[in-house]
Image: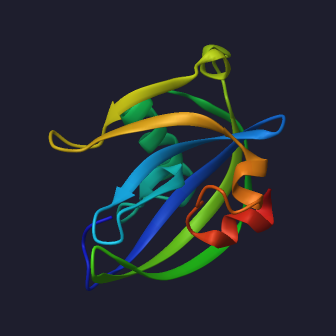
Amino acid sequence: MSKFGKIRVLALGLIRDGERIFVYEGYESVKQETYYRALGGGVDFGETSQAALQREFQEEIQAELTNIKYLGSIENIFTFNDQQGHEIIQTYECDFVDSKFYQLESLIFSESKNHQHKALWVDIAEFKSGKLRLVPGEFLTYL
């Protein structure tokens, strides 16, 4: 979540397995708060958002996606570590090609040399009840 001062275009994939979704866990140090977000990443110039989604999953966790279906767009204006951010998120519903991802409890992946994230399956009820924070909150409308 860097590149403040610009509007970022992202492609994120909501992957469901029954009553749980696959998300990564992040931490906001200023608010001292853990949050969860769907995996995906930035759309490069000249790249479609669906191609970006597939590339990001391949780069981050070496996963291929199938049954990719466009859900909609979310405009997200937020504050993260005391800096304003602005994103246009192209949201997709999709599935993993390899069933091994559904057996995982969690996995660690690196976005860059300094940024490691934990991806895991979380029960949707944890987000709907407000016990855990899914960002952006509009994702809840797709669950």
139 up-or-down from 59: above or below:
below
Judge whether residue 10 can be spotted in this image: yes
User: Is the residue 79 above or below the residue 19 in the image?
Assistant: below
Q: With 132 as the anchor, is 46 left or right in this view?
A: left
Which picture quadrant has residue 9? bottom left
Q: Is residue 62 visible?
A: no
Pick the quarter of the image with the N terminus: bottom left
Q: Is residue 113 left or right of residue 62?
A: left
Q: Residue at x 75, y 48 (%)?
A: 124
Residue depicted at 53% across the width and 54% down the height:
37
Q: Which residue is outermost to the left?
A: 113
Q: Position of residue 135 (x, y in %)?
A: 55, 65
Give how far across and how far down residue 73 sits, in percent: 65, 73
Which residue is located at x 37 percent, y 55 percent? 27
Count the numbered circles shown.
0
Q: Observer-nearest residue: 55 or 40?
A: 40
**Residue drawn 56% across and 28% down?**
64
Instruction: Reply above or below: 142 against 25.
Output: below
On the image, the x and y values in percent for residue 77 come to: 47, 84
